[in-house]
Amino acid sequence: MVRHEVSKVVSGQYECAWMLLNHLDRILEIDPSWTRDEYLETLRKRNIVGRVVLSPMGQVLGFRIERFPKRHEYNLVHIAVDPECQRQGLGTLLIEDFVRKARGSGRKVITTIVPERNMGALKFLKSCKFLATEVLRRHFGQEDGIFMKLEVKDEGDEN
Ligand SMILES: CC(C)(COP(=O)(O)OP(=O)(O)OC[C@H]1O[C@@H](n2cnc3c(N)ncnc32)[C@H](O)[C@@H]1OP(=O)(O)O)[C@@H](O)C(=O)NCCC(=O)NCCS
């Protein structure tokens, strides 16, 4: 299991759930870098779903969007946490939830591509044990993308 040593999230207080259409307003507040139409168009695709992390009061504090392109692989399309709630372990919680799901469905790897200048995301993913394996030249317009992979290990074989 991916677990950051100093995760500040109190286990059991926050829960992950399926992303629903009525979460979209909060998702736009959390990460307005995509438009409503971009979120909707992405989430309408057949092999794409979303998960949210909820506060004890049921407020959406963060989310991830995932794709299952191949039988043995999951793809992290996007992840974001409310700027006011960052560095509290919620992003890690969303990745832990993803790893559990991948393990449950027999998928062996989670991949993602990060813009090379997004140092915060690169450091976050490294802290969740993703490894950078390839540089994709000009993947994001002029900007290179860093292809990252997390090997999903069996429970009890996590190190
Ligand atoms: C990336 C993101 C989802 C991380 O969420 P988070 O809830 O803050 O992450 P966590 O609290 O679980 O962080 C775990 C560890 O990752 C590392 N980390 C996370 N954000 C970091 C940052 N901005 N800079 C450096 N290290 C960071 C730290 O080691 C952190 O542990 P620490 O706080 O004890 O030092 C969040 O910063 C975010 O929403 N960013 C904007 C959207 C984005 O860039 N998404 C990625 C798209 S590819």
Image: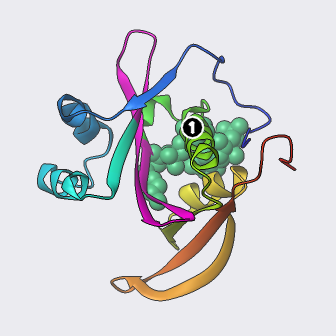
Instruction: Report the front residue among 159 and 135.
Output: 159
Where is residue 158 shown, x and y percent of the image?
83, 47
Q: Is residue 73 above or below residue 125?
A: below
The percent position of residue 58, horizontal first and vertical second, equals 36, 15
Residue, disc 1: 97
Residue appearing at x 87%, y 50% in the figure: 159
Q: Residue furthest bottom?
A: 137
Q: Is residue 66 left or right of residue 124?
A: left
Relative depth, front residue between 70 and 12:
70
Answer above or below: position of 77 versus 98. below
Check if residue 124 falls in the magenta segment: no
Residue 73: in magenta span: yes
**Whole-percent x, y for residue 10 in the image:** 65, 17
Dominant secondary structure, magenta: strand
Above or below residue 76? Residue 116 is below
Farthest-out residue, left: 37
Q: Quadrant of residue 81?
A: top left
| Callout 1 amino acid | Asp
Q: In this picture, which residue range is highlighted in magenta?
A: 52-80
Residue 62 placement: quadrant: top left
Q: Residues within 10 Å of mark 1 (few under 14, many from 20)?
A: some
Q: Nearer the viewer, residue 118 or 72?
A: 72
**Res 19 → quadrant:** top left
The quadrant of the rendering that contains the N terminus is top right
Helix, strand or loop at label 1? It is helix
Q: Residue at x 67, y 78 (%)?
A: 133
